[in-house]
């Protein structure tokens, strides 16, 4: 049977989810193997080296760099407070002294007799990492972090903004092709993850931000509205570090596009459940897609394990989504995967799939199709 | 020694491409090629897997045994194996460097040129005078985590203070390498030799410091080669050692693995030297656009890191502005819908244009990406700044400053395009037109595209150091480049000067190989194509008064030009190119020019 590999976004109802939680630098891990963790529980911490300030003492005191040691009042390794004296000249008969003070509190790291620079390192910055999802600790990465295992639903979006967040799922749109409007968002939705249908306007998203909504999952959003959300025009799709209260996960793409049936159904079934959401996206080698994870505490533990790791190919009968115009966003069934190249309207010669959309057959380049992974 | 067969691979970030070159009937020819997904990332995490898969495809197509279990058979024994195996690599994001110099426009720029020439991506240029405070520089170094740092500054024997200050900043930042936590970051020092001991004292404990010759020993001279060579060595010794499977791959190859763009640059440099011509080469990819040029025998390379056709397509829109993209689109389109469409290409980078409209839009964006990359290239490819020049009285009227761009469009002989949007355009006319519209060649310029992007493999082949095979490999690389790599599109003849509308700017008399003759009057604003294959055509070009076609204003040229898959293109549209500010004029012009070149199927008038 003809077979083709295509990228696919995962929409899995009951699967094993493994999440690596790693510190940026080595530190200490507080969780132990097998322990149950809650999303906001701290599992590892470390100290990032503090910021560095450089003071050119030789310039400030108008002495030669090679003479700096004669004017320094403190040594390498000393702890100092802000405005502590670093160096002082002898002056003339004890008068007209000039001095250099530390602009920050920290530790003196080096004194250079070539350049006259004194390097002061500020106090370390503590960093903590939480569990992000509810589950149990599956593996400890020594001094670096843990891998958390959970069972539940796992849904990937195509693009998102905002980092990790969590909250109860609240389905707002009455169908997958209806929009979330500003009027639908009220202050009692604070801390929740709102699920919509085909679109959320900039106004409605701003209202969500104002109401401290934890996240929004929706089919489409306008590319040009991102500028106001991010404060800059998005040139490359690398997001996740934005300081936004409301993480946004777009499941289909830019524009008004109805949410995939499976995605919408799964989110609707999960209404009221606690979920974790992350808008972080990186579309480069080593792609990261935004995600929604809904742990099922009473999971029927016989879920199809490892499904989240699996990528299935496109075969006759596969459910696929068209990911470029024409027919963008439509869902179809693969009828045939002809081996030979076919000429498109653009005269591009490509491998195609013949798909059935609502009873009509279309010839679509295989690279413009995405397998909808369902379980 | 004649080489009977050569296998060359290029491990890109997504695909590993293998080519087989064989000595057949007295010449080197590309005979087979294969490709397979690159296997640097999980689940394989071993680059050699992808190499073997690509070689296996070559093996299957050629019927020649190349692999023995999990290795490549070298040298050739009977009919199996290959005489040499070589490879380039840009997998895992290529080589990412940070460079530092005392004065940004002098040693900073020289260091940047050395790093780019070696094939790296320059993440940032630190300089004593870049306006940033020391703590800002330190934060930046920490954030970036480069693969390697090149530190330069000062002329030999000059003051040491500034360059040591930079070293102190590096030491305070204590930079960590991008790949692997267990090795020290390689730092190359190529600055004032008087400061070497101070630099060593500051950096040798914290980093893996290597000292090489000064990049600017005196202000008037740039000495890039030692630094470029050192970058290649360290790339092999350190960076590649951290990438999965490279140790094994390095043990297979007959020459050091080169960073892909470094190899392309080396080839272009060699071709320019051999033919004694000025060349511009461009590779437009999904995330970046690389431009290489050789003018006045000087090689330059720039990488426009965020101008590409998929991952960074939205950034082209941001940098070029929507109106500049739209000026190439010969129909009306809702602007907001267009931005959503382009956004969707960014988040689904592997899709292809199915409809004609989508293709036209994609090629419009490509024109802007190429144009902007070339603007950046022209600003960087300059003669040395800070050089004192002796002037005579005659120079007083023609003040030429140091730091002038080397790029001279009228001097340019050949443009070579590569990358999906140029190499795989459904019609070659589209590739030719994209190159002309974005680079705006002046005078007589040949146009070509790299058929399957084999320049990286040919580049490394042309630069093998092993004495016994070096010369023959170079011959093979040039032969294959000439015969199989380049697809000759034709020649563009573009007169420049102040033209008045509908006046004849150039009279053209052509004589073809079969003796046939043709005369053309090229009017201002007109684009004319003459279909003729890759063969010599005698051309007499007579420009109107005040118009230059290469020999000076109003000067006639008798020359030989070559046709190609598109043919001869006479471009009377003038420079800079004005497509028309009124939407109706613009659409009418674009349709007229597209029709002249038979560019698109349905846009004929």
Image (cartoon, helix red, strand yellow):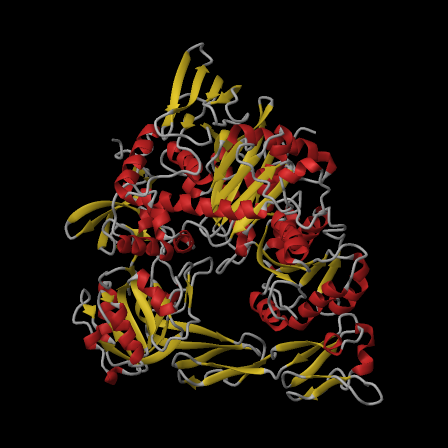
Q: Is residue A330 visible?
A: yes
Q: Quadrant of residue A159?
A: bottom left
Please identify the residue farthest to the left as the structure is shown. Answer: A359
Question: Farthest residue toward the right?
Answer: A93
Q: Residue at x 81, y 59 (%)?
A: B194
Whole-percent x, y for residue A17 in the image: 39, 72
Q: Nearer the viewer, residue B16 or A253?
A: A253
Pick the front one: B97 or B463 = B97
Image quarter of residue B243: bottom right
Q: Residue furthest top?
A: B515
In the rendering, at what x and y percent does residue A189 appear? 25, 82
Q: Quadrant of the C terminus of chain B?
A: top left
Residue B354, x across and y down, in percent: 29, 44
* Residue A207, percent from left and from top: 27, 76
Q: How many marks?
A: 0
Quadrant of image for the N terminus of chain B = top right
Residue B72 visible in this rendered orientation of the protein: no
The vertical placement of B59 against A246, above or below, is above
User: Does B407 sit left or right of B362 as displayed?
Assistant: right
The one of B31 and B386 positioned closer to us in this rendering: B386
A217 shown above or below B467? below
Left or right of B496? Residue B382 is right
Looking at the image, residue A225 lies above or below residue B78: below
């Amino acid at each position: 049977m003809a077979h083709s590999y295509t990228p696919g976004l995962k929409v899995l109802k009951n699967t094993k989810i493994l999440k690596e939680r790693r510190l940026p630098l080595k530190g200490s891990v507080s969780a132990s193997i097998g322990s149950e963790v809650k999303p906001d529980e701290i599992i590892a911490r470390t100290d990032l080296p503090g910021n560095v300030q450089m003071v050119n003492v030789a310039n400030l005191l108008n002495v030669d760099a090679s003479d700096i040691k004669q004017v320094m009042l403190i040594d390498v390794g000393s702890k100092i407070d802000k405005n502590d004296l670093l160096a002082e000249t002898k002056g003339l008969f004890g008068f007209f002294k000039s001095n250099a003070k530390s602009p920050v509190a920290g530790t003196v790291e080096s004194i250079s007799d070539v350049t006259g620079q004194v390097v002061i390192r500020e106090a370390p910055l503590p960093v903590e990492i939480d569990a992000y999802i509810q589950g149990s600790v599956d593996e400890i990465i020594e001094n670096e972090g843990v891998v958390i295992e959970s069972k539940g639903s796992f849904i990937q979006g195509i693009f998102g903004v905002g980092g990790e967040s969590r909250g109860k799922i609240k389905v707002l749109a009455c169908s997958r092709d209806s929009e979330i409007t500003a009027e639908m968002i009220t202050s009692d939705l604070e801390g929740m993850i709102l699920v919509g249908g085909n679109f959320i306007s900039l106004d409605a998203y701003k209202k969500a931000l104002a109401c401290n909504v934890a996240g929004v999952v929706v089919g489409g959003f306008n590319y040009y509205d991102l500028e106001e959300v991010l404060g800059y025009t998005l040139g490359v799709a690398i997001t996740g570090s934005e300081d936004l209260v409301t993480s946004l996960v777009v499941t289909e793409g830019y524009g008004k596009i109805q949410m995939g049936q499976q995605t919408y159904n799964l989110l609707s079934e999960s209404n009221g459940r606690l979920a974790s959401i992350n808008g972080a996206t990186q579309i480069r080698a080593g792609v990261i897609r935004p995600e929604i994870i809904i742990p099922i505490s009473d999971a029927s533990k016989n879920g199809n394990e490892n499904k989240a790791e699996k990528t299935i190919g496109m075969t006759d009968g596969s459910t696929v989504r068209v990911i470029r115009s024409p027919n963008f966003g439509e869902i179809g069934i693969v009828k045939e995967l002809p081996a030979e190249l076919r000429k498109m309207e653009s005269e591009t010669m490509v491998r195609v799939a013949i798909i059935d959309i609502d009873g009509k057959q279309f010839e679509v380049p295989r690279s413009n199709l995405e397998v909808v992974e369902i379980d | 020694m004649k080489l009977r067969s050569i296998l060359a691979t290029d491990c890109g970030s997504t695909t590993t491409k293998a080519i087989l070159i064989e000595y057949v009937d007295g010449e080197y020819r590309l005979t087979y090629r294969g490709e397979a997904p690159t296997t640097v990332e999980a689940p394989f995490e071993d680059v050699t897997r992808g190499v073997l898969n690509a070689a296996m495809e070559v093996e299957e197509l050629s019927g020649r045994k190349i692999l023995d279990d999990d290795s490549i058979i070298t040298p050739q024994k009977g009919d199996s194996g290959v005489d040499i195996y070589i490879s380039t690599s840009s997998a895992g994001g290529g080589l990412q460097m940070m460079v530092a110099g005392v004065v940004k426009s002098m040693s900073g720029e020289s260091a940047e040129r050395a790093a780019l020439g070696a094939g790296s991506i320059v993440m940032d240029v630190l300089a004593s005078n870049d306006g940033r405070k020391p703590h800002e520089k330190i934060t930046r170094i920490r954030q970036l985590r480069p693969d390697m740092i090149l530190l330069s500054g000062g002329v030999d024997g000059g003051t040491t203070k500034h360059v040591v200050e930079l070293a102190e900043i590096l030491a305070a930042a204590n930079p960590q390498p991008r790949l692997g936590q267990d090795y020290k970051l390689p730092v190359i020092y190529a600055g004032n030799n008087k400061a070497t001991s101070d630099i060593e004292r500051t950096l040798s404990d914290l980093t893996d410091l290597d000292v090489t010759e000064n990049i600017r020993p005196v202000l008037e001279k740039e000495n890039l080669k030692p630094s470029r060579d050192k970058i290649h060595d360290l790339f092999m010794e350190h960076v590649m050692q951290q990438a999965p499977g490279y140790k094994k791959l390095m043990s297979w190859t007959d020459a050091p693995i080169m960073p892909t763009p470094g190899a392309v640059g080396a080839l272009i440099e060699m071709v320019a030297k051999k033919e004694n011509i000025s060349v511009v080469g461009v590779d437009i990819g999904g995330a970046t656009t690389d431009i290489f040029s050789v003018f006045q025998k000087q090689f330059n390379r720039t990488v426009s890191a965020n101008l590409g056709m998929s991952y960074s397509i939205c950034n082209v829109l941001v940098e070029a502005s929507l109106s500049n993209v739209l000026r190439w689109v010969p129909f009306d389109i809702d602007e907001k819908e267009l931005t959503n469409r382009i956004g969707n290409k960014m988040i689904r980078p592997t899709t292809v244009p199915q409809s004609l409209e989508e293709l036209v839009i994609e090629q419009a964006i490509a024109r802007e990406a190429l144009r902007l990359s070339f603007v950046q290239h022209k600003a960087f490819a300059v003669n040395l700044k800070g050089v004192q020049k002796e002037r005579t009285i005659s120079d007083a009227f023609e003040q030429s400053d140091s730091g002038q761009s080397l790029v001279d469009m009228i001097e340019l002989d050949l443009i070579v395009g590569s990358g999906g949007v140029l190499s795989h355009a459904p019609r070659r006319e589209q590739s030719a037109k994209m190159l002309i519209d974005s680079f705006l060649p002046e005078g007589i310029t040949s146009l070509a595209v790299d058929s399957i992007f084999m320049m990286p493999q040919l580049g490394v082949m042309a630069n093998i150091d092993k004495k016994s095979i070096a010369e023959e490999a170079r011959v093979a690389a040039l032969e294959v480049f000439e015969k199989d790599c380049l697809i000759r599109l034709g020649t563009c003849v573009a007169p420049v000067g102040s033209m008045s509308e509908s006046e004849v700017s150039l009279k053209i008399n052509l004589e073809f190989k079969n003796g046939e003759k043709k005369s053309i009057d090229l009017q201002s604003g007109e684009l004319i194509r003459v279909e003729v294959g890759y063969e010599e055509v005698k051309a007499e070009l007579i420009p109107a008064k005040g118009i230059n076609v290469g020999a000076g204003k109003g000067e006639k040229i008798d020359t030989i030009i070559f046709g190609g898959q598109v043919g001869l293109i006479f471009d009377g549209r003038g420079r800079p190119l004005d497509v028309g500010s009124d939407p109706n004029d613009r659409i009418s012009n674009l349709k007229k020019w597209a029709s002249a070149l038979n560019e698109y199927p349905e846009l004929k008038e």
